[in-house]
Structures are given as C-alpha cells and as structure tokens.
Amino acid sequence: GSPTRSPRGSIAGQPNPMRMFLVFIQNASEELKERQRLKQSLLKSELKRKAVIDTSVDGVIVCDTSGMIRSFNRAACRLFRYADPSDVIGKSVNMLMPKQYADNHDRYIQNYLETGIRHVIGVGREVPALRSDGTEFPCGLTVSDTCDIDG
C-alpha cells in the first residue's frame, strides 16, 4: 500500500522536509551571525593592538619566526630613519643591524626555535643598529617572544 499522507501531503511518521529545511536555514543564519560577531570582535581587538603599537613612543618591531618584519611602528621609522613602515615590512630584520650581527642572526633564531634556549629574549641590552642611510647608532634592544603571551 501507499503511505498515509497528512492533509498537507507529508508522509505520516516522516519528518517534514520543508520544516527540516527551515530549521537548517535558521541554524545556518545563527552560525553566520556568530561568525560575524567573532569577526567584528577580532577586528576590534586588532585595531586596539595596532593603536597601542602605533602610538608607542618606543620603536616597536614585530618579526615572524623567519626574521621577516611584520610590523614597524612610527617611532621605529623615526629611530631608523625610514619614511614609512612599508619601506621595511616584509623584509628581513637583518637589514636593521650591522653585517657582523646580521650574518649570525638567522642562526640565532633557528637555534632558539629548535632548542627553546634563550640568549637575548627577555634581556634588555644595548646593541649597534643600522639606519636607512647605513650609519650605525647605539640602540636599546629588548626581545620578547609572543608565545609567552599567547601560551
């Protein structure tokens, strides 16, 4: 025999496909709203972080684990005499140090990543640095690992 149908045409004992579709749409809509909320929250947090770094009176340089500059604030521009952060972002941090330091810097990063042994992280010291015009100047350096913050 043929299945029993309700007055609306759905099969008795079977979920209504239209109702299931509406529940799916409602759930997808809620998920989309949550994603938008999280995206807005992340953007707001990133803007705050950027504002703190950009308005710092100290030069702040953020590098990735390969030593590439990812952020360079206005104070760092003044200190190293670059017109704009875009002049250095995406380039090796080695460009900011004299040759004798630059030659070993990548190896220092690699050793830290492999062993976790800190030599300069968390220790403030004065080092020679290199301005955009090639002149050396004494620079106070403090290196932090953001993994200390993020866990």
Image (cartoon, grey):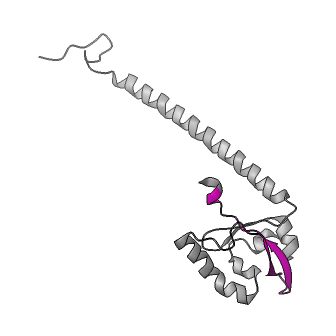
Q: Which residue is situated farthest in the bottom direction here?
A: 100
Indicate the position of residue 87 as horizontal and vertical percent values: 77, 74
Q: Residue furthest left?
A: 1
In the picture, measured across the screen, residue 25 lies left or right of residue 103, that is: left
Residue displayed at 62% across by 54% down: 150
Using the rendered image of the protein, determine whether residue 82 is visible from the camera's viewpoint. Answer: no
Residue 11, how many percent across, how many down?
25, 18
Q: Position of residue 40 (x, y in %)?
A: 66, 42
Quadrant of residue 89 in the image? bottom right
Q: Provide residue 67's location: percent of width, then percent of height.
A: 64, 74
Residue occupying the point 67% across, 42% down: 41
Residue 109 in sight in this render: yes
Relative horizontal placement of residue 145, taking residue 11 as reference (left or right): right
Res 9 → quadrant: top left
> Would you say residue 56 sits in the magenta stretch?
no
In this rendering, the answer to whether 113 lies above or below 50 is below
* Quarter of the rendering containing residue 78: bottom right
Q: Is residue 126 left or right of residue 13?
A: right
Number of marks drawn: 0
Q: Residue at x 47, y 30 (%)?
A: 27
Q: Residue furthest top?
A: 7
Q: Is residue 127 left or right of residue 120?
A: right
Q: Quadrant of the N terminus?
A: top left
Determine whether 128 is above or below 35 in the image. Answer: below
**Range of residues picked out in magenta:** 123-148
Give the residue drawn at x 72%, y 89%: 100
